[in-house]
Image (cartoon, rainbow, N blue to C red):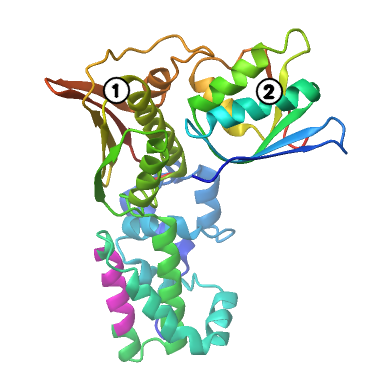
Amino acid sequence: MTGEVIALGARLRNRREELGLSQAQAARELDVARTAYRLWELEAAQPAPDRWRTIAKWLGMSVTAMLLAGELLSQQEADDAEASGPRVGMTSASWDATSDDSPGDFFSQERAMIGDQARLGAISGVQAANLRGALARIQELTAPEHGAWHPGEFTKRMPSSPLAPQIARGALAATAVGIPVDAYEKAALLTSELVTNSVVHARSPWIDVSIVLDPERLRIDVSDAGTDAIRPRTPGDDGGWGLTLVAELATRWGVERRRDGKTVWVEFDLSTPV
Amino acid sequence: MDALKLSLRHDVSPPILSIEGDIDMATADALRAALEDALADTPDLVVDLQGVTFLDASGIRVFLGAAARRNGTGPLRFVHARRLEWLLEAAGLHGITTIEILDEGA
């Protein structure tokens, strides 16, 4: 790589002085501990990759430019990229395969810039591959706001039988691939409870299970032809558990009654784990 | 559905009853029968839930029922029971005295 190398520490200090901020204020803006920020300015420590995007934005430059200018990529990473020469093509292919995520604008711009720089001869092929690898790590570490699951729906009528809870859980497993484990475990449990309640109490020949997965929310509707009462009871070894668990574990839940039956639904807000 | 698998090991102390598979309304009756048989012969057994791939209230009812019928032989003990603990807590029953959850690996 050619061009002026300006260490990140100096860049941070210049920007901070430009904005007229103290180190403490800058640290607050970047959402890091003051000590960490001070060490960055002193070049005694480097920010972890999951911070790069925030820092680059604060500096008013792209991540790629910041990495190139500050030589933030370590010698080890450069060596790794060199050693994996034949894999470079594969790396960019698998990268492209994952580039259809919606927050990809930032990343596709960065990738385009890397490509341009490489074509112009400003950076070597190894450096380009290296930067692509770094970008992939950033994308991983800064996880897209809407998580890694794909929205989808499932609706199925099944016979009311002791096997129905397992069938419904299987449908949930297929529909909710990729959601946070915590939400998945709650959803699997409550799906099982609602379908079990229907089998035991509703005396309906069928059960409809509908699962809707949005970017921010998972909803499960369990409907049947029953008109039985729905109310949580104190759990004991004779039962009364299902709705207690529903009330405790679902983000929201409710009952809709119709002349010809009812629907009990649960919703879970999905947030990307930090 | 695959049937639950239960196996009782007598060559360790205390004896360990391992359960494998999904515990829900489809398997709860079989579990109840097998658990009560095992407890009748081996009252000091510890139930190992490591192989349990799913557990809902149908299973908790079986465990609570078996524990309640022990009549003064102490609480029914479990290992690898993270999921059981979570369910009891969600239902507000984590202080229940008829069930004891031992530390992992105990």
Mark 1 belongs to which amino acid? Arg
Residue A5 location in percent, x, y? 44, 76
Q: Kindly state the secondary structure of the residue where label 1 is placed.
A: loop
Q: Are marks 2 and 1 on the same chain?
A: no
Viewport quadrant of the C terminus of chain A: top left
Residue sitting at x 62%, y 13%: B95
A49 vs A16, left or right, is: right
Residue indicated by mark 1: A203
Residue B13 in the image, given as x and y percentages of width and height: 87, 32
Q: Quadrant of residue B81?
A: top right
Q: Which residues are magenta?
A: A105-115
Chain for mark 1? A
Which chain letter matches label 2?
A: B
Using residue A259 as the reference point, say whether residue A247 is left or right of it.
right
CB atoms at circles 2 and 1 under 8 Å apart?
A: no
Q: Residue at x 55, y 73 (%)?
A: A74
What is the count of numbered marks? Answer: 2
Indicate the secondary structure of the residue bearing disc 2.
helix
**Residue A274 visible here:** no
The residue depicted at 78 percent of the width and 27 percent of the height is: B45
Q: Which mark is residue B36?
A: 2
Task: Say the numbered circle drawn on residue B20.
Answer: none
